Image (spheres, rainbow, N blue to C red):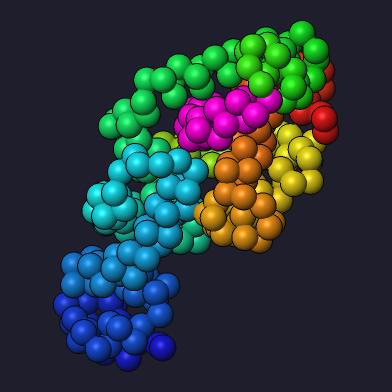
């Protein structure tokens, strides 16, 4: 729906559309109108159009773990994030507004999880033990260890290790986000500080990081690639993925956790400044 000539910012910048006219405008045109005019009456309707996106992302991430916060609390924080995003979004960045907002909302939820320190101490401790076991075995074997090898190292059964891996799944997500923070923007919801995206060096780092991430993903098992694709690209939660793959929800969490662990092992040498070790520590299809 094109704006009538008398309502364009150039012709009549003080004119405000009626509620019905605002509702009839496509989102991209409403966003463009707000960015051009700065009229606050356009901002709140624009924010409300993405309230469902907040809930969708919140429910998707909540599918990885249990009981960290109520969805309503996340939505309230998400609304604030949305309002800030509307003001900070620059169409010249070359990304869609929904993509920009999704990354900021996802980052907000991860930050909220960190601030509230919701993980039980026992889960956090177990996550650290698993990480240390994976790191030690990966260095020793020059590949990603099998579930049996990790279980043996921890002195537990394979079943117990898999249960613990599923329970600590969000720890792996938060840690992966932290890894990406070292090098700016990846495909995990972390954004570069304002202004850095225009730096040639930052753009090159983003390109290299995407290439490394893609290479790491290609080394994963087929079911691990599928889980990551359904979760990150299609936006499905663990329950939905379990239905698609016809396996249990805990099993999906286990596969997801293992895939994230492998990617961390693969990316850590690169992000830590030792990329030549990637091949030796690559995620093997074991």
The answer to whether residue 233 is left or right of residue 36 is: right
The answer to whether residue 162 is left or right of residue 106 is: right
Q: Is residue 93 above or below residue 64?
A: below
Query: Which of the 4 quarters of the picture holds residue 271?
Result: top right
Q: Position of residue 69 (x, y in %)?
A: 30, 43
The residue located at (77%, 8%) in the rendering is 140
Please count the marks in the image: 0
Q: Position of residue 198 (x, y in %)?
A: 51, 42
The residue located at (34%, 70%) in the rendering is 49
Start-end of magenta stretch: 158-180
The residue located at (54%, 55%) in the rendering is 239
Q: Is residue 119 above or below residue 110?
A: above
Q: Is residue 205 visible?
A: no
Query: Which of the 4 quarters of the picture holds residue 125?
Result: top left
Q: Position of residue 172 (x, y in %)?
A: 53, 30
The residue located at (63%, 17%) in the rendering is 156
* Residue nearest the viewer, comparing 80 with 72: 72
Q: Position of residue 89 (x, y in %)?
A: 38, 55
Q: Is residue 83 above or below residue 260?
A: below
């Amino acid at each position: 729906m094109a704006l009538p000539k008398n309502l364009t910012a150039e012709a009549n910048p003080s004119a405000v559309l009626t509620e019905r006219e605002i509702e009839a405008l496509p989102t991209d045109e409403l966003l463009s109108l707000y960015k051009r005019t700065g009229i606050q009456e356009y901002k709140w309707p624009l924010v409300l159009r993405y309230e469902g996106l907040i809930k969708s992302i919140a429910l998707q991430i909540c599918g990885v773990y249990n009981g960290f916060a109520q969805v309503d609390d996340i939505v309230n924080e998400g609304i604030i994030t949305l309002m800030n995003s509307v003001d900070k979004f620059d169409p010249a960045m070359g990304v869609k507004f929904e993509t920009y907002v999704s990354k900021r909302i996802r980052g907000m939820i991860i930050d909220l999880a960190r601030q509230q320190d919701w993980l039980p101490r026992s889960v956090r401790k177990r996550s650290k033990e698993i990480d240390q076991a994976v790191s030690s075995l990966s260095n020793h074997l020059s590949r990603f260890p099998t579930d049996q090898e990790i279980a043996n190292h921890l002195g537990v059964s394979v079943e117990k290790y898999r249960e613990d891996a599923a329970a600590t799944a969000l720890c792996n997500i938060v840690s992966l986000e932290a890894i990406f923070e070292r090098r700016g923007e990846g495909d995990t919801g972390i954004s570069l500080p304002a202004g850095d995206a225009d730096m040639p060096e930052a753009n090159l780092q983003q390109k290299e990081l995407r290439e490394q991430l893609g290479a790491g993903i290609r080394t994963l098992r087929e079911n691990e690639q599928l889980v990551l694709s359904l979760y990150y690209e299609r936006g499905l939660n663990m329950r939905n993925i379990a239905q698609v793959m016809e396996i249990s929800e805990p099993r999906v969490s286990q596969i997801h956790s293992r895939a994230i662990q492998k990617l961390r092992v693969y990316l850590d040498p690169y992000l830590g400044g030792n990329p030549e070790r990637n091949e030796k520590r690559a995620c093997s299809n074991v």
